[in-house]
Amino acid sequence: MEVRTIPRVLHNEVVLLVALSVAAFGVFVFTRHMSAREQRLEARIAAIWYERGEQFIAAGDVEKAIQAFRRATADSHDNQKYMLALANALTLGHHDAEAQQLLLQLRESDPEDAEINISLARLAAKHGDTDEAVHYYQNALYGRWSGDHVDEQRGQLRKELIHFLLRRQQRELAASELLILEAGLPDSAASHVEIAKLFVDAGDLQHALKNYSEAAQRDNHNLEAQAGAGEISFQLGNYAGAIPYLKAALELDPQSQKTRPLLETAELVLAEDPLASHLSPQERQDRILADLDRSLKRLDSCPEPASGNQASSEMQSLKAEALALQPKLNSRKHPPDSDAAKSALGLIYRMQKASAHCGEPAAADQALLLIGRQHNGVRP
């Protein structure tokens, strides 16, 4: 009797165990389902708060945006997008310390993310911390980007860095970044003009001229390109190279008050330079005598300085030197050679410099000053 009862008891226990297991599994599935449902609900609520935050940002209500983004991150703790939005809103609201703390926390978990590094770079730039800003800008530029048009976005960020460096007077660093930007430049006149202006701000006139020239080649009706190439050529002392660009710019804008004087002066430099290589000895003599005579008249037109001061003594000395030199230069049998002409040009240059306080020079006098600088190795 007892032997028959034992299997029945075992059977009942197995059935009970199976039933309990099924019930436990059902409870587990139900709990998991409810947990997932709650997570989905929290995610939807977080998304709603995020969208509201974006709307508040667009409307310019930063404080309400901050509160909305806080709610979004509270309902979705690990969402990097929401946390970054909160950090950027905090920066806009001038809660910089909290923003930086949050951004650094995000960067610890994802140091290569471009967006996080951009936000840190802009926060550092806001506080004028050049080294830190450059560090994060560089990390962003060479970090991990997502989405479409990545190359275009990188180019825009590099321009942002360049503008920051120029504001901070970091011209050498800006020029280095410009060279990288130039390598991937779109092949359009507008792009070359834009980068040429930045090269000018960075003090790199050679690369500025290169880009203005390329812009002018691609669009010969681009006024900025023609005028820019002419002005930079003029500044670099390449007056012959400046003239075609300045003429083209003047044709496009005949009323320009800047281009016409530059063109006139550039043409005068070429017309009055006594050391131009194509001149005959007689032509060189005629030019040097005319230039010397003009410089004497410029000195004579100056108001007489107070007797005994340094300026008065210098002017009198220069006049005496010029008057003594004139007969030596005036011989038709022995016109001045290039060395004599160069020595005379040095005197003309000193005379024009000494008369700088005598009022605005005429275009011809300005040309003589530029000729003197050019042949005496003085940078424009």
Image (cartoon, rainbow, N blue to C red):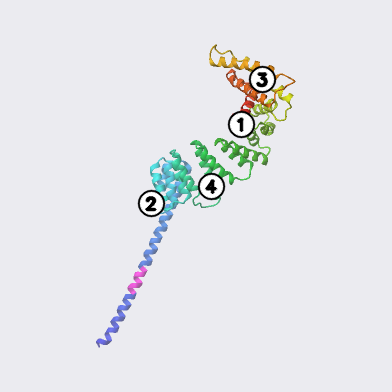
Q: In which quadrant of the rendered view does residue 180 lie?
A: top right
Crowding near the residue tagged with mark 3, few <14, some 14–19, many ≥20 C-alpha atoms within 10 Å: many
Residue 217 horizontal side relative to residue 22, left or right: right
Tell me, yes or no, if residue 61 can be seen here. Answer: no
Q: What amino acid type should be assigned to the residue bearing mark 3?
A: Leu
User: What residue is disc 2 on?
Assistant: 74
Rendered location of residue 274, percent (x, y): 69, 25
Quadrant where the N terminus is found in the figure: bottom left
Taking the magenta stretch, the answer to whether it contains residue 298 is no
Q: What amino acid type should be assigned to the residue bearing mark 1?
A: Gln
CA separation, marks 2 and 4? 32 Å
Q: Is residue 80 above or below residue 97?
A: below
Mark 1 and mark 3 lie on one chain; the one further toward the N terminus is 1
As drawn, the label of residue 15 is none
Q: Secondary structure at mark 3?
A: helix
Disc nearest the viewer among 1 and 3: 3
Mark 4 and mark 1 lie on one chain; the one further toward the N terminus is 4
